[in-house]
Amino acid sequence: MKKLILGLLLLPVCAFGIDTADCADATKLATLYQVRAMMLRSSASYDVDNFIDKKLDELRVPLDGGGFRYVRWVRPSRDPQYDKRGHTVVGVQGTASDNFESSGNNAFAVRVAVPGKRSLFSGNNAVYVGTVHVRYTVEGRERTKDEAINNWMNPDTTRTIDLGTIADHVEVSLDSSTSQKNAKNALVEIHILKAVAQDDPANPNSDTITSLKRIRNTLTPEIIDDEIASLEPGDSFPLYRFVSELRRADTLMRSKKEEDQQKGDKLLKDTLRRLR
C-alpha cells in the first residue's frame, strides 16, 4: 500500500483535475507526502536526503545543456569556494618559463596565488608571474581579459582578477618561472573563485523548494506533518482529499479486524475508481 501511494504521488499533480492556480500548492502538498511516504519506506536518513535532493533538482527544471532553468548564480556574501590547481615551477627566470593552465565553471574571479608552503613541512619560494590570460564565456559569448603582472610574487601573496560578471566557463593560462636555485622548489596556484547557486524566486515551485530545504537536515515525521498542516487545504482541494482517503484506506487495511479490512479495501477501490 505504501508503494501504491508513493507511486500515485509521482504522477503529475495537475493530472488530478486541479485548477492551474492551485498547481503550486498541489505540487507542494504532493511533494511533502512523497517525502513522508519515503520516510515510512526507509529508516536511513541518507535515502531520504537523496530523495529530497533529486526532487529539488526536478523542481528547478533541468536544462538539456546542463544547469537549471530556475537557478541563478550570484557572488557569495562570504569567503568564496574555489577550484585550485597548483604547478611546481621548473623554468628559470630570464632563461625559460612554464605555461600553466586551469579552467572552471560558474566563476566570478580568478586568483593567482603563491602559497606560504608547498607542503605541510616544506616552505615555498618566490615565483615570477608574467601575463595572466583569461578567456571566459557569458551566455554563449566569449570574452577575454589579460592581466600583466610581470613581477615576482613572494610566498603567501595573491593577485585577483575580477571578471565583472558570472562566467559560465573560464579558462586561465599564465607563464611562470623562478630563480635557478629554487627550480622545482616553488609552487604557484590558479584559483577559480566560484559563484554560489541561488534558487530563483520566479520559479512557480519556489515555496516547495523552500520547504524541502527547510526540512532536509531536520527530518522527523512531526516536522513533515507540520509542513503539511501549514497548507490547511480545504475539502475542495482534490489532491488532499484523494491522498487522505488513500491513507485512511491504508490504516483500515492494516487493522486486525476483518470488518475494518473490508472497509479499507472498499475505500481503496472507490478512491482509485475516481481516477479513471
Image: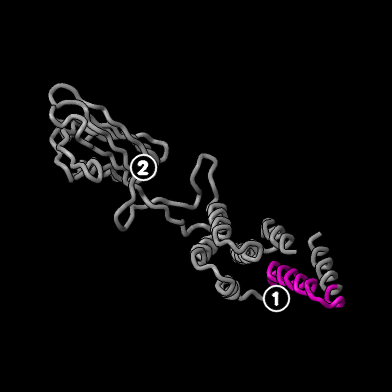
Q: Which residue is drawn at 62% across and 66% down?
A: 36
Location of residue 260 (image quadrant):
bottom right
In the image: residue 139, left or right of residue 45: left
* Relative vertical location of residue 3 with respect to residue 129 in this rendering, above or below: below
Location of residue 14 (image quadrant):
bottom right
> Mark 1 = which residue?
235
Q: Is residue 139 visible?
A: yes
Name the chief secondary structure element in magenta.
helix
Location of residue 268 (image quadrant):
bottom right
At mark 2, the secondary structure is strand
Q: Position of residue 227 (x, y in %)?
A: 56, 72
Q: Position of residue 213 (x, y in %)?
A: 49, 63
Q: Residue at x 83, y 68 (%)?
A: 270
Q: How many marks?
A: 2
Magenta region: which residues?
A: 236-261
Q: Does the magenta stretch include residue 256?
A: yes
Q: Can residue 22 be seen in this view?
A: no
Residue furthest out toward the front = 121
In the image, what residue type sits under mark 2?
A: Ala
Q: Which comes sooner in the sequence, label 1 or label 2?
A: 2
Mark sitting on residue 167: 2
In the image, what residue type sits under mark 1?
A: Asp
Q: Distance between the residues labelled 1 and 2?
A: 49 Å
Q: Where is residue 17 in the image (x, y as percent from the top left)?
A: 72, 62
